[in-house]
Structure formats: C-alpha cells, structure tokens
Image: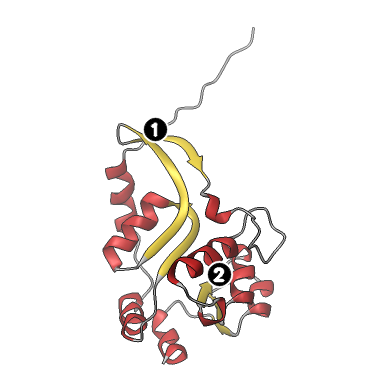
Amino acid sequence: MYQTYRPIIKRENIGDILAVADTIPVTPHLPELLSELKEQGYITGIISDSYDCITNHLKNKLGFDFTISNELEFSKSVATGEVKIPSFFLQDDKSQCKHDYCKLNALISICGKYEVDLKNTLVVGDGENDICCIRKAGIGISFCSSSHMVDAVADYIIKKRDFGLLVPIVQ
C-alpha cells in the first residue's frame, strides 16, 4: 500500500508578505544615497528578479522612481504562487545580449522611457544576473558580490555593505 503525501502550503496574503519585508533591514545609508542621486538629477529604480509586491513596496517606502520585477499573482489578496515575467526582461530587437531573459533588456526599456542614454546610467548589482547591466552601464558597480565574474566587469567594486561608500563615486 502506498501513502500519498501532500505538501502543506501556507498561502500568504499581501499584508503578511509586506510585514515580513518590513522586518528586513535596508542596507545602511540607502536613503542618503538616494537623496544624493536625486539631488544630482538621477532617476532611481529597482530592476529585480524578485517580486513586484516587494519592489513596489520599497519604491513607495524609500522614494525610488520605478521598479521592474516579476509579478506575483494574487487572488483576493492571497498569493496564488503563480508568477508572470514582464516582457521588459525578454529579448527583443533592442537587446544587446543573447539572453532570452535579461535585466539589461529592462534597463534599455527604462532608458527609452526616460530618454536616457545607456552610457548615462549607473548600475549597482551583486549577482551574475547583473553582469550584462553592469558591463553596459556608464558606471557599473559590483556591490558585495561573491562572484569574481561580477567584480571583473565592474568599474568599481565595493565589498562592505554600506551604500554610503557609493556617494563619493556619484559626486
């Protein structure tokens, strides 16, 4: 006789997800960095392969101008577990790399929306999925990355978890 096991899945509502997100501390000096960037006329945003409910919450809480991330679907405010990938990430005729899914595609799209040349961007990343953006940005920063490949393409490498260290770079 076989026994069937069914996983127990707790479905979280949006309020619970955002409450957990609020318990995670932001990297020190992020508000000061955002203030400095905005003072200099930068458009600030988050391009993430995380979920839009989290990145939008951070955008609203911290004052970013935009976010692009995967869409976690909800039904009656409860996460269904389904995720939609925005077309911003997908390769198209403006793509500058060969990946089918790439953050650089989203960055190019945002640059088009705000009429900013890719060479006038600053990208901060920590993972290998950020390499294309870091490489193509006007200023690419490897931030606390454990990947030598990320460090290799960056203009600046920062190993201490402190956004205050970026202020001299952008001044």
Badge 1 crowding class, 10 Å Cα cut-off, few under 14, some 14 to 19, many 20 or more, is few
Label of residue 144 in the image: none
Amino acid type shown at disc 2: Asp
Amino acid type shown at disc 1: Lys
Above/below status of 81 relative to 43: above
- The quadrant in which residue 45 appears is bottom left
- The quadrant in which residue 101 appears is bottom right
Specify the color scheme.
secondary structure
Residue at the right extreme? 98
* Cα–Cα gap, marks 2 and 1: 30 Å
Residue occupying the point 43% across, 70% down:
114
Kindly state the secondary structure of the residue where label 1 is placed.
loop
Instruction: Please give the residue where the numbered disc 1 appears in the rendered image.
Output: 10
Of 138 and 58, the residue lying toward us: 138
Residue occupying the point 53% across, 77% down:
117
Instruction: Please give the residue where the numbered disc 2 appears in the rendered image.
Output: 126
Q: Is residue 137 left or right of residue 29?
A: right
Mark closer to the chain start, 2 or 1 = 1
Instruction: Give the x, y percent position of residue 7.
Output: 50, 27
Of marks 2 and 1, the one in the foreground:
2
Residue occupying the point 39% across, 32% down:
10
Instruction: Give the x, y percent position of residue 152.
Output: 68, 79
Above/below status of 160 relative to 114: below
Residue occupying the point 35% across, 37% down:
12
Instruction: Give the x, y percent position of residue 52.
Output: 41, 51
Above/below status of 158 relative to 85: below
Quadrant into which the N terminus falls:
top right
